Image (cartoon, rainbow, N blue to C red):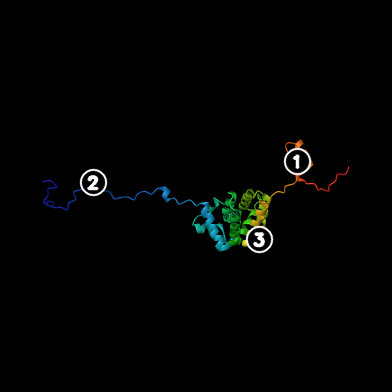
Amino acid sequence: MTLQDSPTDAGRTDIDQTTPDEVQTPMSPSPVSEAAQAPTPLSRRQIIAATTEVLQQDGYDATTIRRIAGRLNCAVGSIYRYFTDKRELLYAVTQQRFEPIAELAEAGGSFEAAVRMYQQRATEAQQSYRLMFWLASLDPNNPTGVPTVVSRMLTGWARSLGDAELARECWTLLHGSILLGRTGSAIIDSLTALATSRTRKPRPTLPHTPAYESAQAQDPSGQVAHVLTAVPRSQDDMTML
């Protein structure tokens, strides 16, 4: 009699009939890929956003790299991968606020819309606005002291208005008004009127004189005639011989 035919096991239905090939081993947890385990890399945008919050809540003196790292729950070295020091980080933060205005100006957008946006963003964060210019003045590679984002805006305005000097004049009036606390629609209307009058002012048409006609006949290029037209002579001018 074999073991299977033993009286003890005869007639029992609770005997495990599983064959050795069917024996299941305990399931082990599926391996997690290294990419899923690795922390998400910290981005420049995240650092700037966290720094903006700390600066607005705690002010310049309390805005430290260590405090920013604590808000991001990261190591201090993670921030230094993107910025060399606190000043470089804050310079990027303060300029970020005016980035949409520079992009609008570079794209040839509405001058009035850009002026309104500039005034609004500067007055809403006066401390950040003044800090931006102070940090720009510390840059040895920037002798003008004008922040990079503002320079880009001025380049766009000069292209749209067709006059770089007019663009600088409009911004100077806008910047000075903000620093003096003189803001509102009246300032914007004045700047818009100034830009419109200067860009649409027609050039005077001067009458053709006999000297002009003679010069035009002798000079097909028109260069001499242009000089005579640009410098009008009075009817009372006399040539002393």
Which dot, 1 or 2, sits closer to the camera? 1
Tell me the residue at 53%/60% (across/down).
Answer: 53
* Residue labelled with disc 1: 225
* Residue labelled with disc 2: 22
| Crowd band around label 2 with a 10 angstrom C-alpha radius: few (<14), some (14–19), many (20+) | few
* Residue labelled with disc 3: 177
Residue 223, image quadrant: top right
Coordinates of residue 36 in the picture (x, y in percent) = 41, 50
Tell me the residue at 56%/59% (across/down).
Answer: 64
Element marked by disc 2? helix
Q: Earlier in the sequence, mark 3 or mark 2?
A: 2
Element marked by disc 3? helix
Q: Quadrant of the C terminus?
A: top right
Q: Earlier in the sequence, mark 1 or mark 3?
A: 3
Q: Which three-letter amino acid code belongs to the residue tagged 2?
A: Glu
Please state which of residues 205 and 177 is positioned toward the viewer in this rendering: 205
